[in-house]
Image: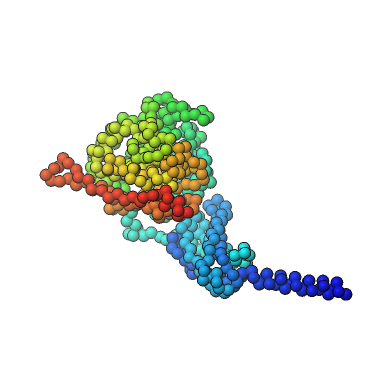
Amino acid sequence: MKSKVFIGLMVIISFLIAEHIHAEIPKISNLHFSVNTAIMGEEFTISIEFEGDVDSLFIENTWETKKGEIKKETKEYTMPQDIQEKQKGVIIQKWKIVNPKVKLYRIFKVWVKDKAGNQSNSLSGEIKVKIPEIKLEEKNYSHIVVLSDLHLPGRNIPMKEEVIENINSWSDVDMIVLLGDICAEFGTVEEYTYAKKFLDQLNKPLYPVVGNHDYLYEDNIPGKHVKASYTIRKKKLQRFKETFSLQEVFYSKRVGGYLLIFLSTDDLYSGNNTEISGKQIDWLQSELSKNKDIPTIIFFHAPLKGTLMGNNKYVGDDKHIAQPNRKIRKIILENAQIFLWISGHYHIAPTNANFNHKVNIYEQQVVNIHNCDMDGRSHLSEADYEGKGHSNIWTNSLYLYPDKVILKTYDHKKNRWLEELKREIKPLKVIVPKEESGLRKIESSLRFQGDVDQNYQNSH
């Protein structure tokens, strides 16, 4: 009899303990969005009602890619003290959809946990996403996306596909510049075929230039890059022109009040990796002499001499800078309208101090803008000798306004613009005094942010 009473008491106690534990688990209800349709880039709020102890809020964000793949990301928010001290109330969390991906809707799943890790029930809801229309009369800039060192097909293919999706979703893009090394290694027929198919996915005009991996080497020598003969180099340059429907590998374009010049590494004899041919140098001088008073931006695979510091294995090696260096320097000094030089080749990531530093200013006249590669081999810091393997891609965008150029950087893994790295560069104003018609006075405004490496890392 006593044993039966004991067992009965244990059952009751267990039931009461279970009820007590159950009562301690937080609950949520009434998931609400402040808007029915979210405008990309504009804030809205997600709110829920809660009961019980709440320490953390979790929001799971789900979307569908162009290929029908379902992707998710979850963010955790620690609740402020006033929420943690309450047993009942409303949690309101701000949210912004920076990139709508492809499918213009999002599914959100929300739940909370207490300090002991007990998880509440979850609530789900769907919201539409709208890309804001940019009216032509309101768009007073040209948006140029810069892609460098794609190395196709190469490594990092899922992220490369992600970059394509992201850029295609930006409605204000006017053109896309490819800074060379489009091919992974040797510029083979197979690499060019893959590159053509891959880049055909982009929905804006392409403006490519040649990098060393697009023409300079013999085919398929594993682990080696043996410089090819005159005949092979010439054949691969022709392959480049045919792939991208170009009459020549160097050309120019007027965009708004700017002259854009596209130069290629194309020398057929040089032992340097990034040298411009004599024919191209002559064309460049002629093009600049005809456009003395137009602010000019030059796109080329390699950087200008002296615009990098640190332990990168190519720094100090003149085979990897824009060559012929002395002729290029002379041309720049004789043409004060050149104020930006956009380059790749060195694979400079935004976490690297070289990405935005005073060392980038060439001859107190031209700002060299360095770009990251797309193959996951970027130099993440100036002390990085070989280039660290990773899975991220960052791309630069130039916004050409009538009186300035805004440079912005996009993190394609975190799907956000890195506002902390935003730069403003005003074109050089070329003034010809009446009494000194042969001289030119240069007025420039170059803005830099210090400690870029530290700023970027602290923001993540």
Q: On the rendered structure, is 441 left or right of 342?
A: left
Q: Closer to the camera, 1 or 22?
A: 1
Residue 288 position within the rendered picture, expressed as x and y whole percent measured from the top left: 26, 39
Q: Closer to the camera, 36 or 59?
A: 59
Residue 36 position within the rendered picture, expressed as x and y whole percent measured from the top left: 50, 68
Residue shown at 78%/71% (left/top)?
10
Task: Point out the residue furthest to the front here.
Answer: 2
Residue shown at 59%/65% (left/top)?
115
Q: Closer to the camera, 15 or 166?
A: 15
Residue 383 position within the rendered picture, expressed as x and y whole percent measured from the top left: 43, 41
Residue 46 at least partly seen: no
Task: Point out the residue furthest to the right here.
Answer: 1
Residue shown at 45%/37% (left/top)?
385
Residue shown at 27%/43% (left/top)?
365
Q: On the rendered structure, is 449 left or right of 66?
A: left
Image-quadrant location for residue 13 = bottom right
Residue 29 position within the rendered picture, expressed as x and y whole percent measured from the top left: 59, 71
